[in-house]
């Protein structure tokens, strides 16, 4: 199975939080302790990677060689689409020079003990932050000052806890100007603010630290680091006051109307933004994940229960200031229905209205990643990050049109929605919950995409289209999909069309009353997670597929039962809790992790995984993030030998008064820190680059 080539994808010639698992602080603030409560389901890329998705698949469809296809596609692109493809992108360079091993050579680092407060990169590389929490983005923004934080200042400064991040070069900039997108998933009052700060002020600054940021970057050349440009024309903060247009069949539905928005189409703010993706047309997708943690609700309806909404006070208590955050208030019973969507943002137009796409369903979206199918339809894959929840696929009604950006920006507004069912091919008795490989040598089998919405109509008996899309979890429960071990990032490889699913962990699998190991989730008390590889049977719109596990994670040296597609387990970097995924310019998979410290006892990191050829399954650790942090992003610009990660929640378990990390400033002893420096950890987007050549 592992070497299976997708039937309609030519393989290109370059290839030879759970409880007890992550920080309790992270659990409380990021996920609203989703893992501490009952399981909700009680029913039986980077600036080139996604344009590469489009061009590679179109290439296969059109039968071009690499350079020919590139010329055809780029010739038809609008300016923003060019921006995704231009600027030394992996695809451009590869197409010009022919495919070859990645330029990003490095000696893997040793895994780093969990108490080390340092950013660790390979020999010959160094790192610098590009932008940090609180950095001023506009000319009228004050310099960050830990002691003088206000909502007005934070609204003009970079937000907190950057997660999905991408860098898109600006058209015509010769590679020296770009735009950076980051989302800001959540806040941690205990380490952001002094204990003496008034609660009202904490809540106001905290709200302003959520949302999204777009900021321009500049550099001298590709060997020099990026710096952000304060006051640049494209700079933008998206706040809780920003209006998002709800698109698709649920827009205007009675299920999403509130007293403040009787149209059911204009939603204020975005919450819990986690991973994301960059579309072939140069927009950014961001997943609204743990939105339930921001709302008080009756907590008694099937919908509330299935999405983890309860009547408890929230961690941040915004409900004290704004009635919409308590859905028991008159006129706001649907407010939580307005979150849990995939958001689309145009980073090249600072006046554009961002969108929330109801056609992709409502659940705890980790993110979404788009590929153009051979047929021209665009396909978006998205995981629901909750124990025992599901994997989804959206297929657009209309087709991608090269160069027609305005049209392409409508593609996620209408289409079909499916949920995945996996069937293993080994006897159930051989899946013993230990992670031991069955006798046929692989965790593998077949699968189906079960329809939820087809041709604009509900495929779920007893539910309207609007109900399917607003209560997607309840709809999916009715059609029998496979309960997964927390699907995080789901990303198609632009070079092969194979789809990779990061299942991060599931401490509850196999517990009394809970589902036990299955071939696609083969470990009970799954502490370290695994990666599923899906091969669609036809093009990406197919409703059937085959699958296998690329890896079953852990630390072989600590005795963990692991599997790396047959690669010797004593030659891999230990890896735990895969989360965000990315591909480099030659099709290697890169995995960032979230939760390794309390799993294998090591700081989280970024890992390169070889997918094809004799070294398939080889895992090499590239970097480790500081104490308590999670590795987000990532962006792999291997053609320039640059790597970028968003370092999220450094020092999460400390307090303002007793910080657990001083990332990224690390002011030397005896040096007077500048305002904001060194006295608190600052989540930051970091670039890692070579210093030795
Ligand atoms: Fe925000 Fe599923 O990680
Ligand atoms: Ca098997
Ligand atoms: Ca994540």
Image (tube, rainbow, N blue to C red):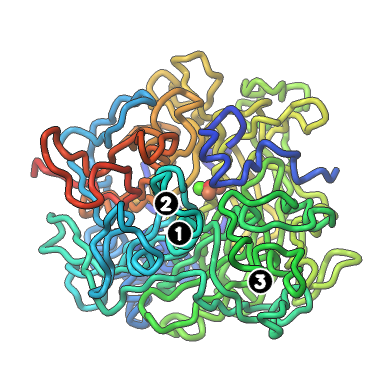
Q: Is residue 609 visible?
A: no
Instruction: Check disc 2 and report the residue beneath it.
Output: 197
Q: Nearer the viewer, residue 605 or 199?
A: 199
Residue at position x 79%, y 72% in the image: 465
Give the class, few, some or many, for how many residues have Cα within 10 Å of label 3's Cα (few <14, many ≥20).
many
CA gap, disc 2 to disc 1? 7 Å
Instruction: Check disc 3 and report the residue beneath it.
Output: 358
Residue at position x 46%, y 21% in the image: 555
Q: Quick one: quadrant of the C terminus?
A: top left
The disc, 1 or 3, on the residue closer to the chain's N-terminal end is 1
The spot of residue 610 in percent (x, y) is: 39, 38
Q: Give the side of residue 213 with respect to residue 561, left or right.
A: left
Q: Are marks 2 and 1 in contact (CB under 8 Å)?
A: yes
Quadrant in the rendering for residue 455: bottom right
Q: Is mark 1 within 8 Å of ligand 1?
A: no
The disc, 3 or 2, on the residue closer to the chain's N-terminal end is 2
Q: Is residue 588 visible?
A: yes
Instruction: Check disc 1 and report the residue beneath it.
Output: 201
Mark 3 lies on a secondary structure that is helix
């Amino acid at each position: 199975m592992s070497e299976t080539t997708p039937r309609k994808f030519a393989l290109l010639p370059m290839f030879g939080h759970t409880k007890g698992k992550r920080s309790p602080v992270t659990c409380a603030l990021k996920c609203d302790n989703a893992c501490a409560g009952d399981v909700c389901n009680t029913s039986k890329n980077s600036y080139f990677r996604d344009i590469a998705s489009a061009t590679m698949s179109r290439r296969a469809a059109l039968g071009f060689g690499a350079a020919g296809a590139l010329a055809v596609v780029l010739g038809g692109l609008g300016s923003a689409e060019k921006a995704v493809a231009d600027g030394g992108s992996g695809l451009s360079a590869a197409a010009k020079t022919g495919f070859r091993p990645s330029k990003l050579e490095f000696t893997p680092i040793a895994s780093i003990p969990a108490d080390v407060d340092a950013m660790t990169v390979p020999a010959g590389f160094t790192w610098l932050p590009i932008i940090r929490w609180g950095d001023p983005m506009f000319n009228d923004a004050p310099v960050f000052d830990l002691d003088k934080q206000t909502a007005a200042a934070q609204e003009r400064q970079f937000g907190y806890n950057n997660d999905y991040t991408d860098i898109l070069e600006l058209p015509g900039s010769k590679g020296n100007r770009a735009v950076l997108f980051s989302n800001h998933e959540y806040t941690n009052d205990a380490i952001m603010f002094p204990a003496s700060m008034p609660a009202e002020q904490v809540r106001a600054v905290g709200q302003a630290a959520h949302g999204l940021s777009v900021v321009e970057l500049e550099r001298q050349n590709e060997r020099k680091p990026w710096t952000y440009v304060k006051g640049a024309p494209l700079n933008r903060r998206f706040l809780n006051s920003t209006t998002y247009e709800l698109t698709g069949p649920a827009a205007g539905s009675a299920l999403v109307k509130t007293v403040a928005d009787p149209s059911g189409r204009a939603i204020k703010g975005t919450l819990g933004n986690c991973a994301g993706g960059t579309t072939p047309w140069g927009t950014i997708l961001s997943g609204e994940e743990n939105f339930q943690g921001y709302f008080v609700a009756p907590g008694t309806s099937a919908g509330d229960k299935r999405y983890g909404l309860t009547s408890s006070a929230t961690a941040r208590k915004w409900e004290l200031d704004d009635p919409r955050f308590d859905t028991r208030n008159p006129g706001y019973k649907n407010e939580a229905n307005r979150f849990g969507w995939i958001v689309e943002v145009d980073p090249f137009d600072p006046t554009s209205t961002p969108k929330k796409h109801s056609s992709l369903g409502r659940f705890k979206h980790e993110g979404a990643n788009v590929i153009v199918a051979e047929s021209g339809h665009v396909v978006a894959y998205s995981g629901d990050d909750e124990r025992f929840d599901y994997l989804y696929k959206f297929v657009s009604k209309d087709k991608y049109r090269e160069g027609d950006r305005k049209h392409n920006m409508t593609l996620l507004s209408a289409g079909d929605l499916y949920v995945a069912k996996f069937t293993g091919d080994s006897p159930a008795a051989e899946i013993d919950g230990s992670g031991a490989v069955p006798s046929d040598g692989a965790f593998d089998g077949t699968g189906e995409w079960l329809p939820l919405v087809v041709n604009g109509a509900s495929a779920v008996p007893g539910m309207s289209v609007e109900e399917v899309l607003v209560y997607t979890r309840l709809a999916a429960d009715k059609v029998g999909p496979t309960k997964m071990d927390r699907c995080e990032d789901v990303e198609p490889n632009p070079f092969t069309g194979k789809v990779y699913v990061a299942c991060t962990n599931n401490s509850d699998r196999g517990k009394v009353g809970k589902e036990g190991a299955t071939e696609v989730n083969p470990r009970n008390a799954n502490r370290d997670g695994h990666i599923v590889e899906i091969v669609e049977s036809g093009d990406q719109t197919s409703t059937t597929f085959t699958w296998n596990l690329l890896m079953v994670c852990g630390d072989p040296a600590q005795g963990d039962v692991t599997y790396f597609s047959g690669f010797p387990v004593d030659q891999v970097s230990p890896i735990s809790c895969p989360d965000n995924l990315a591909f480099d310019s030659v099709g290697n998979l890169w995995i960032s992790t979230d939760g390794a410290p309390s799993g294998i006892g090591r700081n989280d990191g970024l890992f390169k995984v070889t997918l094809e050829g004799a070294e398939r399954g080889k895992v090499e650790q590239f970097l480790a993030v500081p104490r308590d942090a999670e590795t987000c992003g990532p962006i792999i610009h291997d053609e320039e030998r640059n790597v970028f990660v968003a370092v999220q929640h450094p020092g999460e378990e400390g307090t303002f008064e007793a910080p657990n990390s001083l990332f990224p400033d690390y002011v030397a002893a005896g040096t007077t820190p500048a305002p904001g420096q060194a006295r608190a950890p600052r989540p930051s987007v970091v670039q890692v680059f070579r210093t030795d050549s």
